[in-house]
Amino acid sequence: MINRRALFWATPILWGAPAATVNVLYEDRETALPSSRLENGDLWIPSSSLPSINGFEVKPQGACRADICIPLPKQLKRGNWINLTGFARKVRQSFVQEGSLWSFGEMPVLRASFLQSRVAPDFAVADRQGKPVRLTDFRGHKILLLSWAFW
């Protein structure tokens, strides 16, 4: 009798359909993944591709980025593969897919770090002369930000 579980783990080619090159959009970058798999609507990628997509690195304690580590349950890992859409659901990150293009939204867990640290993310606006002024130009100084919108 064949042990199906052993066969499944020993030959990962048997699970999920190999996908053509997949492009993943996250923040301001696009990452082309020539090696990926689709299974039940989920996108599986090599663990080594995760840092280039969202800056997380798979470690024994989970997926880590800076001082944040998200534990990865067994169902999100398979050998050297990780379920990217399952990870997105775990961190409450929105995503959409159209053909071979996957777009991932902002991660609330990362946004929360701005609220906890009370450090605003950097941005740039034009001054009265049209020159760009960045928030980081004023680090170390107290500033008052006023915003207004007419819509």
Image (cartoon, rainbow, N blue to C red):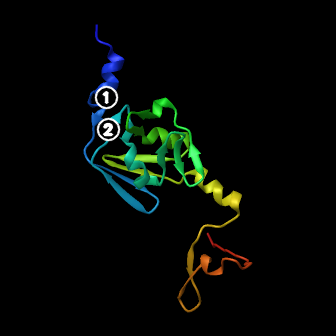
Is residue 107 found left or right of 32 in the rendered image?
right
Q: Residue furthest top?
A: 1
Few, some or many residues within 10 Å of mark 2 (<14, 14–19, 20+): many
Q: Position of residue 38 (x, y in %)?
A: 33, 36
Location of the N terminus (image quadrant): top left
Dot 1: element? loop
Q: Position of residue 5 (x, y in %)?
A: 36, 18
Residue 15's label in the rendered image is 1
The number of discs equals 2
Dot 2: element? strand
Few, some or many residues within 10 Å of mark 1 (<14, 14–19, 20+): few
Q: Amino acid at mark 1?
A: Trp
Q: Are marks 2 and 1 in contact (CB under 8 Å)?
A: yes
Choose top left, top right, bottom left or bottom right for residue 37. top left
Residue at label 2? 37
Q: Position of residue 83 (x, y in %)?
A: 42, 38
Q: Residue furthest bottom?
A: 129
Is residue 146 found left or right of 130 in the rendered image?
right
Q: Position of residue 131 (x, y in %)?
A: 53, 88
Compared to residue 50, the image places residue 71 above or below, namely above
**Which residue is painted at 58% across and 87% down in the image?**
127
Mark earlier in primary sequence (2, 1):
1
Q: Amino acid at mark 2?
A: Arg
**Which residue is painted at 57% across and 46% down in the image?**
69
Is residue 117 found left or right of 14 in the rendered image?
right
Compared to residue 63, the image places residue 133 above or below, namely below
Q: CA distance from mark 2 to mark 1?
A: 8 Å
Location of the C terminus (image quadrant): bottom right
Task: Name the one closer to the observer, 53 or 28.
Answer: 53
Compared to residue 32, the image places residue 14 above or below, namely above
**Which residue is painted at 47% across and 44% down in the image?**
58
